[in-house]
Amino acid sequence: MDIQWRNLDNVPPHRFVCGYCGAHTGPNRGYYPEGHRSDQCTDGTYRTIYICTYCESPTYFLGEQQTPGVATGNPLKHLPAIVAEAYDEARKCMSVGAYTAASLLCRKLLMNVAVAEGAKPGEHFIVYVNYLDSSGYIPPKGKPWVDRIRDLGNIATHEIKITNQPDAEQALTFIEMLLSFVYEMPGRLANP
C-alpha cells in the first residue's frame, strides 16, 4: 500500500526536543497519512510528521517513538577534533538505539583522549588507560568510572551479548564526566 502524506496546518501542538537542532519545540504544523480520519494506525499507534519551528526539519513519530531521536548526553564545546567526533557519534548511536555501538565508542574515547594528550598511537588498550591514570587525567575517585567504561566496551567487543540501554547510558555518562574534567571545565575557564 502506497501511503500518501497530507499536510495539516493545525495539528495539536506536540512538544519534543528536535533530533536535528536540539531545540525544545512544540509545532502545530505537520503531516499525517492520507485516507485516515486521524493519524491512528491499525495497531492503535499514531503516525505523524512534525516540522520543527526552529530548523524546519521533519521529525517522524510512531506513537511516542521519535525519529530522529535526541542525542543522549550534553554537547561539549572544548573537545579536540579526534575526541569530539567520537563523542558526538556515541551520542547519536544512543539516539537510534545502537547501544552496543555507543559502548564501543565510549571505550574508544579512552584511547582517543590518551592519544590527544600525548600517548603514542598504536599501543595496547591497557597502555592508554594506564597513561590516563598516571598522567592525572582521571579525576580523584574516577578510576572506577574508567574501569566501567572499559569493561562495558570489552563486553561489547569480545562477547556475543548485546549492550542494553542502561549500560550504554552509564558508559556515556561516565565518558561525558571524564571529558568534562579533562576538556570542558578547563575550556570554560580559558574562554569565559
Image: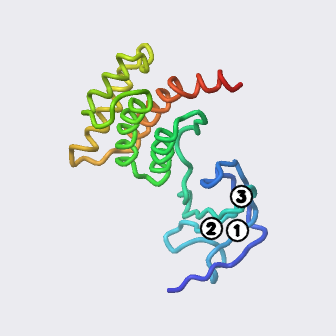
In the rendered view, would you say 27 is above or below 88? Answer: below
Instruction: Decide which of tag 1 and tag 2 comes sooner along the chain.
Output: 1
Tag 2 residue: 48
In the displayed structure, does residue 174 sit left or right of residue 20?
A: left
Q: Residues within 10 Å of mark 3 (few under 14, many from 20)?
A: few
Label 2 sits on a secondary structure element that is: strand
In the rendering, which numbered label is found on residue 30? 1
Q: Quadrant of residue 122?
A: top left
Label 3 sits on a secondary structure element that is: loop
Mark 3 belongs to which amino acid? Cys
Q: Quadrant of residue 10?
A: bottom right
Q: Do the residues bearing badges 3 and 1 touch, measured as CB atoms within 8 Å?
A: no
- Residue 37 x, y percent position in the rendering: 66, 78
Q: Do the residues bearing badges 1 and 2 touch, measured as CB atoms within 8 Å?
A: yes
Tag 3 residue: 55
**Alpha carbon distance from label 2 to label 3:** 18 Å
**Alpha carbon distance from label 1 to label 2:** 7 Å
Mark 2 belongs to which amino acid? Thr
Residue at point 40%, 52% (across, down):
98
In the rendered view, would you say 42 is above or below 125? Answer: below
In the displayed structure, does residue 144 sit left or right of residue 179?
A: left
Mark 1 belongs to which amino acid? Gly
**Alpha carbon distance from label 3 to label 1:** 14 Å
- Residue 29 x, y percent position in the rendering: 74, 66
- Residue 189 x, y percent position in the rendering: 65, 21
Residue at point 28%, 32% (across, down):
151
Q: Residue furthest top?
A: 140
Q: Quadrant of residue 34?
A: bottom right
Q: Residue furthest left?
A: 159
- Residue 41 x, y percent position in the rendering: 54, 73
